[in-house]
Image (tube, rainbow, N blue to C red):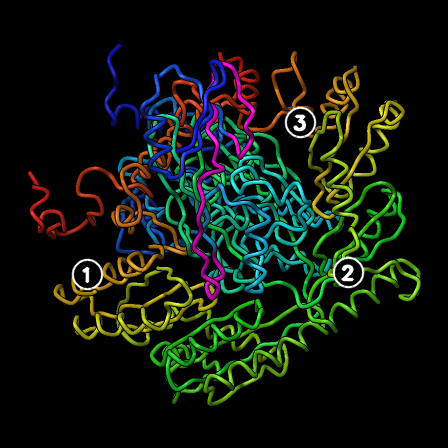
Amino acid sequence: MSGGVKGAARWLGPTSSSAAAEALASMEPEQRVRIVGHTQEAMEGVVTLACAELRGYEHSPADQTLVAATGERLGEIEAMLAEHGQRISVFPLTERQKGMTLGALLGGGKDVASVQRYGRLRESLIGAEFVLPDGTRAHSGGRVIKNVAGYDLAKIMVGSLGALAFVTAASLRLYPLPRRSVRVRAAADLGAAVALVDAANRSGVELATCEWGGGEIEFGIEGPSAAVEAAVTRLAGLLGKEVAKLEVDEGDSGAPSLALRLAEERESFDGILVKLGTRLSRASALQAEIIAEGLADEGVWMHSHLGTGIHYLGVPGPGGALGRLDLLLQRAGIGGQLITDPGPGRGSVFVGRRPGGLTTMRRLLDGFDPLGRLVSPMRTSIMEETGSAV
Amino acid sequence: MAIASQSVRMEEFKRRVGGLVGAGECILGDAAALSSYGSDGLIRFRQTPEVVVIANNAEEVRAVVALCSELGIPFVGRGSGTGLSGGAVPPAGGVVIATSAMKEIVEIDPVDRIAVVEPGVANLAVSERAAPLGLYYAPDPSSQSVCSIGGNVAENSGGAHCLKYGFTTNHVLAMEVALPDGTLEVLGGESPFEPGLDLRSAFLGSEGTLGIVTKVWLRMLSRPEAVRTLVADFESVESAGAAVSAIIAAGIVPAAIEMMDALAIEACEKAVGAGYSLDTAAALIVEVDGSQEEVDALYEEVKSSCALCGCTKIREAADQAERSRIWLGRKAAFAAAGRLAPAYIVQDGVVPRTALASVLGRIAELATEAGLRVANVFHAGDGNLHPLVLYNPDSAEESESAEKLATEIVELCVEIGGSITGEHGVGLEKACSMAAMFDDGDLDVMQRLRTAFDGDGISNPGKVLPSPRLCGDVPGRYRAHPLELSGKAVRF
């Protein structure tokens, strides 16, 4: 196990699940612990438990499954699988995301453009191993793609922000790399983009990605070459253009896709990012309400994994914009979550309509971490929302 | 304060429940009617409930659950009762809350591709209603014409087409549920992302142990433009298995790949006359769907893969009617097993796809050792076996041999890295086998999750997790429990 001490802060990087369990079991009961990927940043009085040094994987190409320690870097996994003509369900990855650990992807519940085709990471997560804050080791699921034995504890780890357990390994269903992949881009405001997605869905074109931002829409199309060719022709028809005049990139052209450009913009944004979900058809109305509220004038912007109704709002901060956005979303009945640190003074990461089952979430935290050892914005938020002591 | 006895609490429940749902919606004293709710599709587990409540809406479900919570009375939610693991068997001294009358399809939105339905709606009814909009609901358990969406949520049901499209969990955005404390909550949202801990995923497949579903938001898909289906015959299950691997290795994800051995084919043919070859050792049903161009490309590759692996005959569905006939045979397989023997036990183990051939060989050896026949029909693409252990229930010896063989098959699946259940659920039947897959730490954490939803343990108790004493005892005549036989437990 690697480790270090910075003042009253400690950083631990266990190299195995058993080492993590021993470390947690041997700590003083009141010792607080923060779970991270590979960040070295320390927190005063808190042990930082990183998954970065948990390495190793078992890849079964013929079964299309991967069991990987959560310290494995996404870029390395991507490259290894590509040699076998396979991939995980999360793509395309920015350079920063390629350096991210599998554990950080899982705990952060990050979504990328492929959510359109394969759903969230939870949809391809078939098992996980983890350690509770008291050192209890456990697993759920397994390494077969179909399995309903017991509760699906693996999926509740996705997006839990380290509030439940230290995940040490994950089992993933894999997918074949497409034979051909193209991206079709066009200028479209959000209203036009929603109409295009609806038309594409009705046309029988299966979309691999569907991104909107900065006044552009981008459709990703994958499959056998002839099928991709036909899909592009259909999309051209929907866009009212000839294929020759359409902006089309082959997936292997090296040109940056809109999906990557938008993801990199979000990564480099120094304000507050809010992630939220709506029905597809509500996207335009939401944008109109943001404009009407004057938030767009204050610099609030919007990106979307449009086909799934998952949106990001960038809120320049500090200022009153976040508070007004919170109220707007509450009025609209839309639930959102901050995905960047809002800074001091704001405890909860929830904005807008609060999620259902908050009391059950608090009981779940009490069950998994009865001593409240884990330091997590998810825990802080649930405790605050339920009026409980953190 | 003195704690009232169970019988006193039940009398109190019976006195008050009619005021919640209307006296006509409660079955209280009709022994025959109550008995009909005593089991699900796995009839060897049976327990007559004290009361059956047929709820008409979410508020009634909530109110009855709240009354159960107040009085400490165990309950089980019930959809169509087609489950195959004893998951809907009532708890002793408990109440059945049936959602089978809640059949409204509240909304189907063709732009958002969302359907909002009550839990009693039949799986197939959703697709039928959505067909004019060019949409359908992808999970398709064999019982889809009768099984309910609420039951599908409880079991995280699969079906033949989940290889490409995933399981119920991949197609449910949100659920309104009556939690065991008598509150209604919506878990999940109208997009795949919802803030907070993912309780939606915890609830899906929890087999009624975390509460009762009262409304479901379903993700609908566009009907594929083209579908092509074939039946490929092989001289052995090994060569059929090799064809499955070859298709997957080519980077093709068919909509479905199903396999049947000779005995299963015989049963299906006797039952529905689907036109399968009776002189073949194994057959694959392979279906590809998508755009016309995609299907045209992939279908020829599937045929080539089958040919390279020694396929002896390919029957191609010429039209929708023939495709339906092919699937009718496959989906009737369980019921058709009754043509081969008076009784059978169906198992639901999963193995890594690459282990299919070796596992089938081992199952044949175990069957020979037990002196029993086993018909195999399974979802080959995802390694989900459905061995049908055939036996004569009039023979106590043969019945016990069949149960032993079925257990051995499941444990074989676990030994090679698989699962005890792929889609039927743990229920009562396999609760005892959970310890073969999960150690004490795993089960402890699952119990913590269960307690977070149901601190009093009143929602479908006795299911999923093994109970501490003689777990898996089947009601009825005394039979020594395996733990007794091994000397690890004594019955007082």
Asked if residue A312 lies in the magenta stretch, the reply is no
Q: Main secondary structure of the magenta part?
A: loop
Q: Amino acid at mark 2?
A: Ser
Please rate how many residues cluster around mark 2, counting C-alpha atoms within 10 Å: few if below 14, some from 14 to 19, many from 20: few
> Can residue B428 be seen in the rendering of this structure?
yes
Quarter occupied by residue A152: top left
Quarter occupied by residue B343: bottom left
The residue carrying mark 1 is: B404
Q: Secondary structure at mark 1?
A: helix
Numbered circle sitting on residue A340: 3
Against A179, is B101 above or below?
above
**Looking at the image, which is closer to me, B398 or B415?**
B415
**Residue extent of the magenta highlight:** A36-65
Q: CA distance from mark 2 to mark 1?
A: 59 Å
Q: CA distance from mark 2 to mark 3?
A: 32 Å
Residue drawn 79% across the image and 70% down it: A230
Please rate how many residues cluster around mark 3, counting C-alpha atoms within 10 Å: few if below 14, some from 14 to 19, many from 20: some
Q: Is residue B357 left or right of residue A76?
A: left
**Looking at the image, which is closer to me, B103 or A104?**
A104
Q: Amino acid at mark 1?
A: Lys
Q: Amino acid at mark 3?
A: Thr
Q: Secondary structure at mark 2?
A: loop
Q: Secondary structure at mark 3?
A: loop
Instruction: Same chain for labels 2 and 3? Say yes or no.
Output: yes
Say whether marks 2 and 3 touch (CB < 8 Å).
Answer: no
Mark 3 chain: A
Residue B373: x and y, percent?
25, 74
Upstream in the sequence, badge 2 or badge 3? 2
> Can residue B65 be seen in the rendering of this structure?
no
The residue carrying mark 2 is: A253
Residue drawn 32% across the image and 56% down it: B42
